[in-house]
Amino acid sequence: MQNSFEGPGATAARFTGLAVTGERRLSGTLSEVTLDGGQVVMVKRADGDGAARAEAAGLRWLADAGTVRIPAVHGHDAQWLVTDRVATGRPSAGAAQRLGRELAALHAAGAPAFGAPPPGGPEDAYIGLAPMRNATGPDWPRWYAEHRVLPYLRRAVDDGTLRSSEAPVLEQVCERLPELAGPAEPPARLHGDLWNGNVLWGADGHARLIDPAAHGGHRETDLAMLHLFGCPHLDRILDGYQEAAPLADGWSDRIGLHQLFPLLVHAVLFGRGYAEQALAAARAALTG
C-alpha cells in the first residue's frame, strides 16, 4: 500500500521487490536509486493529479511500438513513477541517423485518432508542468486549433502574457489551418514533448526517449519540437527519418505552425518572450 510519507528509496523497493543500497537526489522531484545487485532506477514524484499515470501510460505505449528505445516502467501510483535509468554517453551522427529511422517507425505505429491518449492514460494529461487535454477530433487542423492552440491562447490573454489585440493573429491561423496544414495524414503515435532534454543518448550508442506527453497527432509536430530548442546532429536525425518515411512537400515551411502549441505553453509558464515567438511564428505562417 502506498504511504503518503514514503520516500524514493522505499518506493523503488515497493515496485521492484529489491532492497535499496543507495539513493541520490537529483532534483526536487527526481532521485536515482541503486538496488541490490547493482540495478539503478529513476524515481520521479508526480507534479500533478494523473501525471504519473499519464507518463507511465505514454512510456508503455511508445515502447509497445518496438521502435525507439524507451526506459522500462517498473510501476507507478498517484504520487510516484519508477523507471530504468539510462546510462548516457555522447551523441553521435550514427545514433542520430538511427533515431530518425526509429522515430519514423514510431509515428507509423499510429494512433486511434488525433488527440487519443495512450491506452490506460487519462484524458487530462500534461506536457511538462502544463495541463494537456487528450480529447479526440476528426481531423488534425480542427483538432489542433480546438484542443492545442486556442486553450493556451485564451489562457495567455487571461494572464496578460498576450494582449487581447494580438490574439486575432493566432485566431486567424486557426481559421486557416485546413489550408495551411499541408496534405492530410493519418494520426501518428507521438512522443508529444520531443525537445532535446527528453532525448537521452545512451552509452550503448542508442538514443532513448523520456518524459513523453504521448498522444495521437501529426508526425511533423515531433520534428518541429526537435527544431524548437535544437538537438545534436538534427540534420542526421532528419536524414534518417526521410530515408524511412519521406515527409510531405513543404514540411519545413510548416515547422512554425507546429511550434505554436509548445510556444504558447511556454508563454503561459515562462512569460512574454515565448508569446512574442508564437506571434512571429503565426505571422510567418499567414504570410507564407
Image (cartoon, grey):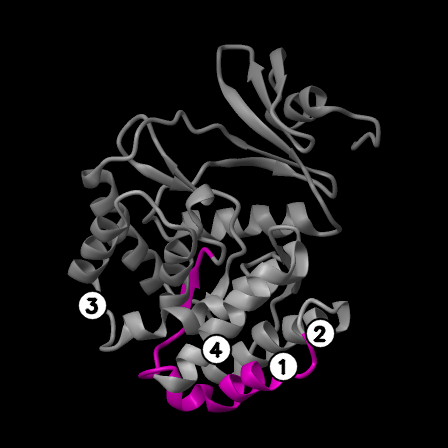
- Which disc number belongs to residue 98? none
Q: What amino acid is labelled 1 in the image?
A: Ala
Give the mark nearest the N terminus, 2 or 1.
Answer: 2
Magenta segment, which residues?
163-191
Pair 3/1: label in front: 1
Whether residue 144 is visible to the viewer of this picture, yes or no, is: yes
**Measured from the top left, where is residue 140 in percent x and y?**
46, 80
Pair 3/4: label in front: 4
Q: Nearer the viewer, residue 273 or 75?
A: 273
Outermost residue to the right: 4
Q: Nearer the viewer, residue 48 or 284?
A: 284
Residue underneath mark 1: 167
Q: CA distance from mark 4 to mark 2?
A: 16 Å
Q: CA distance from mark 2 to mark 3?
A: 38 Å
Q: SS at mark 4?
A: helix
**Placement of the N terminus among the 4 image quadrants:** top right
Q: State the image quarter where residue 257 is shown.
A: bottom left
Q: What amino acid is labelled 3 in the image?
A: Pro
Residue underneath mark 3: 246
Residue underneath mark 2: 157
Q: CA distance from mark 3 to mark 1?
A: 34 Å
Structural crowding at the residue carrying mark 2, measured as other residues with C-alpha within 10 Å and reported as few (<14), some (14–19) or many (≥20)? some
Q: Are the residues at dot 2 and dot 1 in contact (C-beta closer than 8 Å)?
A: yes
Q: Nearer the viewer, residue 249 or 69?
A: 249
At 70% from the left edge and 81% from the top edge, which residue is drawn? 164
Residue underneath mark 4: 282
Q: CA distance from mark 4 to mark 1?
A: 10 Å
